Amino acid sequence: MLTKSAFPHEPRSALLGSIPHLVQSRREFLWRSGGGLGGIALAALLNDEHLLGASPSVQPGVHHPPRAKRVVQLFMAGAASHLDLFDFKPELVKHHGQPSDFGEHVEAFQNGLGPWLRPVWDFKPYGQCGKLLSEVISPLGDVVDELAFVHNMVGKTGVHSQATLLQATGFDRPGFPSMGAWISYGLGSMNENLPAFVVLPDHRGLASNGTKNWDSAFLPSQHQGTIVHPDRDQPITDLFPAAQGDFVTPDSDGAAVPLINRLNRLHAVDRDDDGRLDARIRSYELAARMQTAAPEALDTSDEPAQILRMYGLDHIPSSWPAEINAAEETVYFAQKCLAARRMLERGVRFVQIWSGNDNGFPRRNWDSHEDVQRDHGPLALGMARGAAALIRDLKQRGMLDDTIVLWTTEFGRMPSSQGGKGRDHNPYCFTNWLAGGGIRGGVSFGPSDPWGYKPLDRSQPTRVYDIHATILHLLGIDHTRLTVRHNGIDRRLTDVHGHVIHGILKNT
């Protein structure tokens, strides 16, 4: 976090003795750094030292009063079908089985341009808003009045790896920080004993691009996502000594940590310009603090029975059938959602939950080329149960008002069929939904065309830059001002694009 010293235990002058020309205060460094977040960080530092008369309505590190202070992102890896979940199209029902005709040349990823395919599940209205949802995600009907659907999302590519990076980082190629890393860099954590950015991958493995989806890239590396597996006996890899390290005792560990910290600080004295070293030291110090904080945050044994029941975690079978089913998917996704809530309420700034991995067959991701019902069914029901429980839980704790929930995927799926039961990639139109933290619930924004093939108004699509700009806006950040100079360019999460989607925001 920019507002805290990397070496809080000992003044630098004490380490350097009487070598004044090597002493540069952190305040001087931030003042001279200029541009990007240097000014914001300096303001935060001065505020910590009670030397800046900041307006009480605007926090250090933000550009305007925030509506939210934390984010949880639900990412469906493999491309979830908007047509079978959220975006009902009567024309597909009416013309089911007839030859598809898009009125233009279509470049399909796997030539999935068969007959029109109706939604594989029926839809019905939910909530006071009357939003039509697929029966497979019916649990979301209980919270649909909290959700804002954006149906005219458009991507740049139908390739999973590029499209996933685009949604995660704002760029369709590697080398750029994820949204979570940007938010960690701009705002930091609200708990120094836990990371600002936590990632909960699918239990079967990582999605396309692997760890690049939550990389910090050219930002300091302490802002990359920390991987947590709530379903494992050791949720955080290497947080504690391995079994063969039985010679490590609490006393020896307690004596070693201060020594290592002092050696790190001495080593850093003559290396002020090495950001990697500073980030590594911060990471080591955080890991030491997490040994106490993380187990408590991930231990759900103190959760009341009604909370476990709400998440569907009140009864977990000791063994599962060979065929993966909706009950198992509910448990795995709900475990992540409950862990996310516990971390968010303890000060984690950004939590990313993944559903679906990049390998294995039959498919256990959302890439339903062969059979939408088979692939989407268990995943969709498990996601809906966990997501609905998370939203209800946040709301009853008073946290939904300042927590943004974002549901996304890399692109949608075609209204035409592939092999009779599947759907091909559709980067031309898909759906996101948001809830909480300043979002106006019970609304649908940006309709798609009658087939769900492209936005109804092709001149004004919604892109990932607009989603990112809106989230930063709700966090109190102007997306055009959150910049870092890299390779001669002022880089930002939204590249050179992005507009706040005011149509889904509550009135201020």
Image: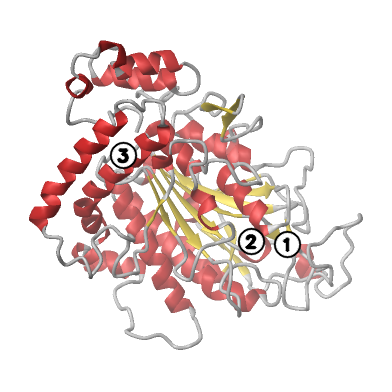
Residue under the image location 33 percent in, 22 percent down: 44
Q: Compare residues 236 and 333 and report the one nearer the observer.
A: 236
- Residue 282 — which label? 3
Residue 431 at x, y = what percent? 63, 53
- Residue 79 — which label? 2
Distance CA(mark 3)–CA(mark 1): 42 Å
Residue beneath disc 1: 425
**Left/right of residue 264 with respect to residue 325 in the rendered view:** left
Quarter containing the N terminus: top left
Q: Does residue 38 show up? A: yes
Distance CA(mark 1)–CA(mark 2): 7 Å
Residue 99 at x, y = what percent? 89, 71
Circles 1 and 2, Cβ within 8 Å, touching? The answer is yes
Q: Does residue 67 show up? A: no
Disc 3 residue type? Arg
Circles 3 and 2, Cβ within 8 Å, touching? The answer is no
- Residue 380 — which label? none
Distance CA(mark 3)–CA(mark 2): 36 Å
Residue under the image location 58 percent in, 33 percent down: 502
Disc 1 residue type? His
Residue 330 at x, y = what percent? 43, 71
Residue 465 lies in what quarter of the image? Answer: top right
User: What is the crowding at mark 2: few (fewer than 14 residues within 10 Å), some, or many (at least 20)?
Assistant: many
Circles 3 and 1, Cβ within 8 Å, touching? The answer is no
Q: Compare residues 52 and 337 and report the one nearer the observer.
A: 52
SS for dot 3: helix
**Left/right of residue 341 with respect to residue 427 in the rendered view:** left
Q: Compare residues 46 and 249 and report the one nearer the observer.
A: 249
Outermost residue to the bottom: 321
Disc 2 residue type? Ala
First of labels 1, 2 by sequence position: 2
